[in-house]
Amino acid sequence: MTAFVLVFGPVFTALFGLLFSAVVALRPPGLPLSVRVPQAHADDAVVLSAIRRFRWGLVLAWVVAAATTAVLALLGQTPLAVVLPVLLYAALSVLALVLSRRMIIDAKRAGGWFDGVPVRVSAQLTPPTYRHPPIIWPALAIIVLAVATAVDVALYPSLPDPIAVHFNAAGEANAWAAKSVWSVFGILIIGAAAVVLLAVLSVFAARYSVRIQADDTAQQAALRTQVQRTMLTSVLSELSFVLALGISAIELAQRLFPGVRGAVAGGAIGLVVLVMAVVIGNVARGRAQLRPANLRDPRSPRPDAVDDDEHWKGGLIYVNRDDPALMVPRRFGLGWTVNLGRPAGIALTIGLLLVIAGVVTAIILTAHSR
Amino acid sequence: MLIDIDPDSESPLYQQLRDQVVQAIADGTLKPGDALASVRQLALQFGINSATVGKGYELLRHEGLVRTSRRSGSVVARGPAEEPTPGFSEGWTSRLRTLLAEAVAHGMTDESIRTTTGTVLTDFAARRTDHTRSAS
């Protein structure tokens, strides 16, 4: 039990730190730590030391989170020892980002980095071409879930009624429900829904809307667009497979080896590690592919991008009334963020927060009712 | 191809868009039949109002350089190889008159005006040849 608690938080946050660090390296040269800087200052000493500081901040956040895990585990605060360090790590890493990027912003303002620098907003005039996301991973995901379902169907008559639906990490059942399609196949149904959702999202990701970095050449912009799309699409479609694999493994462990110590917990940790491996692997590959797009040729200089920092709160939240886009590509990390400058964007965010709050409340209520 | 808009320029955004498309047709970057991004796609990329982009496209349509159909979207309608549309030459000559008058009023010599004109035209032609060669 304690082993699971002690391992989960530190492993999860360490992987998250690796991901954060890899994301920093994904940046176009003009966007260190989500701050807009002109090409002439892309490798400024302040920029490089701010990035170093951010990485140290991540290490520090990990140490604090790991220490919190240990203390809470010693005090026997089990659920808190898993959840709190992860939340603490998330908050501290955002703080590290906000503080270290402020170094660059201050230097930029004090040094007048953009004074007299020609800036442009660029766009691709030729219409975008889209590729279909690969069908292989969602297909494999469905096959894996189908195998697990087949095993469940075969075992169904021999399963006890009521059936155990929740186990503690030691593998002891601590909640039961009447045997029904939902109590037996529920987790597989949720898994199938998640696979479908991820497949749909990957179709959208393959059509990822991009914003051209004005300092990219046309070829570099095309490469950046394609790599970003592929990265996002692969993450989503590979995740659908990993998720199906993890869910099926946990389900089969429960059915075939009920009461085996750590089977379910091991499956859960394995799932988290696989999920992070997929994300980090794709980001690392994307980073290598993006290298030619981040080179700058001093012989044929491109104009700089417009300094749009005022619209990026903390480098993460986008607020721009004049931008017609509801969703814009993130400046830090993968995927999109909502434009909070638009009423529809605010409504969408409130809706999402309500859904998350609802799910969390439902989990807490069901946990307490047991 | 990339369109670069200067937000600090005195020239309005739609005018800059229109001017760059015209230049791209002249230097062979865009050829007749080439598809253009939709007004909405372009506006979302720039992060500006669709109406502004639409105005630029409207100018190009009005000049007969771009045509828009429901089926194939906006495409480049003509290129340097085709005869000018009737009446184009008159309108253009009167605008050129204003441009030449500016140059003369600001003290540019006839000789340097002719040289500049020649350089620009040679540049367009050279780029056109490059584009044809790289296409084939």
Image (spheres, grey):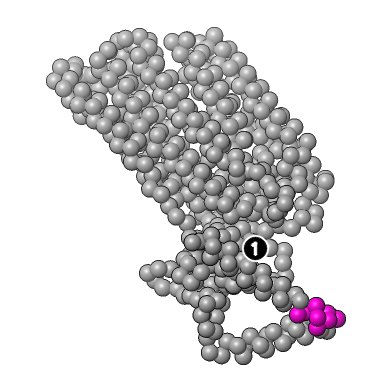
Location of residue A221 in the rendering, given as x and y in whole percent from the top left corner: 57, 51
Location of residue A254 in the rendering, given as x and y in whole percent from the top left corner: 29, 17
**Residue toward you, A93 or A14:** A14
Residue beneath disc 1: B5
Q: Amino acid at mark 1?
A: Ile
Q: Per the image, is B110 magenta?
A: yes
Decide: is A109 above or below A78: below
Location of residue B129 in the rendering, given as x and y in whole percent from the top left corner: 58, 67
Q: Residues within 10 Å of mark 1 (few under 14, many from 20)?
A: many
Rendered image quadrant of residue A233: top left
Per the rendered image, the range of residues in magenta is B107-114
**Magenta span dominant secondary structure:** helix
The residue positioned farthest toward the left in the image shown: A157
The residue at the point 20 percent across, 29 percent down is A181
Q: Chain of mark 1?
A: B
Decide: is A105 above or below A283: below
The residue at the point 30 percent across, 36 percent down is A139
Report the number of discs.
Answer: 1
Give the quadrant of the C terminus of chain A: top left
Instruction: From the viewer's perspective, tell me whether residue A302 is left or right of residue A163.
Output: right
